Image: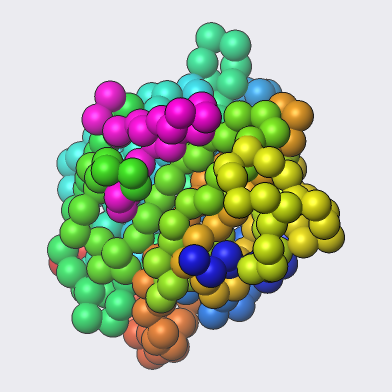
Amino acid sequence: MSIRPVKRILKAKPTVEGAGVQLRRAFGFGATEDFDPFLLLDDFRNDEPADYLAGFPWHPHRGIETITYVLAGEVEHGDSLGNHGALGAGDVQWMTAGSGIIHQEMPRGDRDGRMHGFQLWANLPSALKMTAPRYQDVSAADIPEVAEDDGTRVRVICGSMWGATGPVDGIAAEPSYLDVSVPPRRRRSIPVATTRHAFAYVFAGSGKFCNASAPLAVPTEGVGWADTSLAEEADNRSLVLFDRGDEVTVEAGEDGIRFLLVSGKPIEEPVAWYGPIVMNTQDELRQAFAEFRDGTFLK
């Protein structure tokens, strides 16, 4: 097996989106090559209702997919096609905007005022930019969780892991979206297809991600590295971008570690991006906004 070395570690940065929602952006609105097919990851964990209740009023999307994963609180949503509903703790919505949709997302905290979750944007290849919009709404109960003898747990939202397959399917980039928890001071290796780009986003605890395919101290799981220079430390709100290889190896810190592990097949096409619309050319982008202005955006 070939361990994926750490390419770089980024800290999510405070930003404001929607009608004034305070959140942290792990990546987005920059160079897309390293994260292809993914475009953006926002961490909207917040314990102050005044910082999120204004929400994300009506806005368009075209050419992308938005993936919302709620940990605490509730997100009410509705769209121009008449769809509406709410996502609760543990739920996922995988929305394929395709040719165009206008929707709103309004966060509502839990009884303690917490609104916790993430939104990931995935690009669509040119052949599917103008596909019909669709939703895959997945309740928490339908997301399989697998556990290993050492206490490592993985919620499989999309893709496959240790015999479990996530409920989200039919996605062009063939992504894997995992919620991984490793207990304190344990080490785990998680397979990731060599052909995919991959990143981890830490949101609880801390740990060290192996930074080389050099020999470890011993070959068994759960024992640390003799040479700690071979590992990169990451804690809450750290995004770890990996280089090529076929597995990610992490050693959890004293409080364990929990992170999203996301990978996907690169699309490797030109990106023309402005706000909530992502196309392949500037002409396509201008056309999308012209259609939004003149009322022909929805197909």
Q: In which quarter of the image is the C terminus?
A: bottom left
Q: How many labels does the image show?
A: 0
**Residue 230 image position (x, y, % from top left):** 77, 61
Q: Which image quadrant for residue 192? A: bottom left
Which residue is rendered at x = 59% and y = 72% of the image? 243
State the residue lying farthest toward the top: 111
| Color theme of the render | rainbow
In the picture provided, is 244 more to the left or to the right than 205?
left
Q: Can residue 221 be seen in this view?
A: yes
From this view, report whether residue 242 is shown above or below residue 110: below
**Residue 23 image position (x, y, % from top left):** 65, 43
**Residue 91 image position (x, y, % from top left):** 35, 31
In the picture provided, is 296 more to the left or to the right than 151?
left
Q: Nearer the viewer, residue 216 or 21?
A: 216
From this view, report whether residue 51 is shown above or below residue 261: above
Residue range in magenta is 141-160
Q: Nearer the viewer, residue 293 or 201?
A: 201
Q: Which image quadrant for residue 172? A: bottom left
Q: Does the magenta stretch include residue 112?
A: no
In the picture provided, is 187 more to the left or to the right than 207?
left
Which residue is rendered at x = 24% and y = 30% of the image? 142
Which residue is rendered at x = 57% and y = 35% of the image? 182
From this view, report whether residue 169 is shown above or below residue 256: below
Q: Can residue 35 be seen in this view?
A: no
**Residue 166 image position (x, y, % from top left):** 27, 44
Q: Nearer the viewer, residue 230 or 107?
A: 230
Q: Does the magenta stretch include residue 147?
A: yes
Which residue is rendered at x = 45% and y = 82% of the image? 271
Q: Which image quadrant for residue 194? A: bottom left
